Image: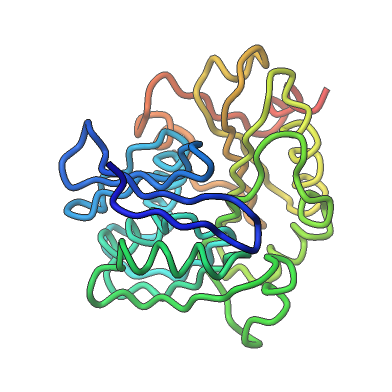
Amino acid sequence: MALASRFLRTSGVHATIDPDPWHDDAFVLSIDNAEQSQVNVAHPEDVFYEYLRRIANTVDLLKPAGEPITALHLGAGALTLARYIQATRPGSIQHAVELERELLDFVLEHLPMPSGTLLSSHVGDAREALGELPSGLKFDVVILDIFSGPDAPAHLACADFYREAAAVLAPGGILAVNVGDEPGFTLVTSQTLALQQAMAHVAAYGTSNLFTRRFPGNIILLGSAEPWAQGWKQSLLAAGPHPATVLTGVELDELTR
């Protein structure tokens, strides 16, 4: 039985929050019966979904463990990564943008953020909201979690938007883009090329078998204005989930052919 459900009038979809039958103190946000996010309210440092865990691994390498960061979430979902950052880096300053106010309200009503979380929420289109942020605000990480399949919004799935997102990064900051795609990875290919046009250093991170392009799944694209730190790739590979692959430099040509 669902903990809560709500019809979202803006998009015309039905959102539910259900107890996770496999994990104590965990809940799953679904949209029209498709699972979107999982939250462990007792242990927000435990990130269950594979692609979110990989973004969390990237966040872990931004600064020494426990040191606060600034983070911008474009696409809020159940705020799983915002909860993770608060749990592992208390005092972090975070902003979250969600297109649908009702979804954000629904999540925060039934799965409130941990006490002490410094999170500012914004309702609206990700690109428009990016341009409306306070002048001078810079982020250690910008996380874009909006794309799912070939119907990605054209005004977001482009080099110009990535340049705008890169412009709000602090020195050493990383843009992390979750790209969910179908076999063939047409969207992953186009977004890798777009990110390469916008940022000097690009990496692709995901489960190894996805790079055969024969299976649907999520690839995390990472962009930085600065070279990757020594040992960075090895740290991501070691962090799992296993088996993992990280492509950089000429290796990344595999995704752009």
Q: 199 or 13: which is nearer to us?
A: 13
The picture places residue 135, in percent across and down from the top left corner, at 66, 87
Q: Residue at x 68, y 65 (%)?
A: 126
In the rendered structure, the answer to whether residue 200 lies left or right of residue 210 reads right
Spot occupied by residue 93 in the image (x, y as percentages of width and height): 41, 76
Residue depicted at x 77% and y 61%:
163
Rendering coords of residue 209 (x, y %): 54, 14
Quadrant where the image shows the C terminus:
top right
Q: Residue at (70%, 67%) from the top-left corner?
A: 125
Q: Quadrant of residue 12?
A: bottom right
Whether residue 20 sits left or right of residue 188 in the image: it is left
Res 211 quadrant in image: top right
Closer-to-camera residue (248/124): 124
Determine whether, in the image, residue 89 is placed left or right of residue 206: left
Foreground pick, 99 / 195: 99
Residue 48 x/y as whole percent: 33, 38
The vertical placement of 187 against 251, above or below, is below
Residue 207 in the image: above or below residue 193: above
Q: Quadrant of residue 251?
A: top right
Q: Is residue 2 left or right of residue 172?
A: left
The image's colour scheme reads rainbow
Where is the N terminus found, in terms of image quarters? Answer: top left
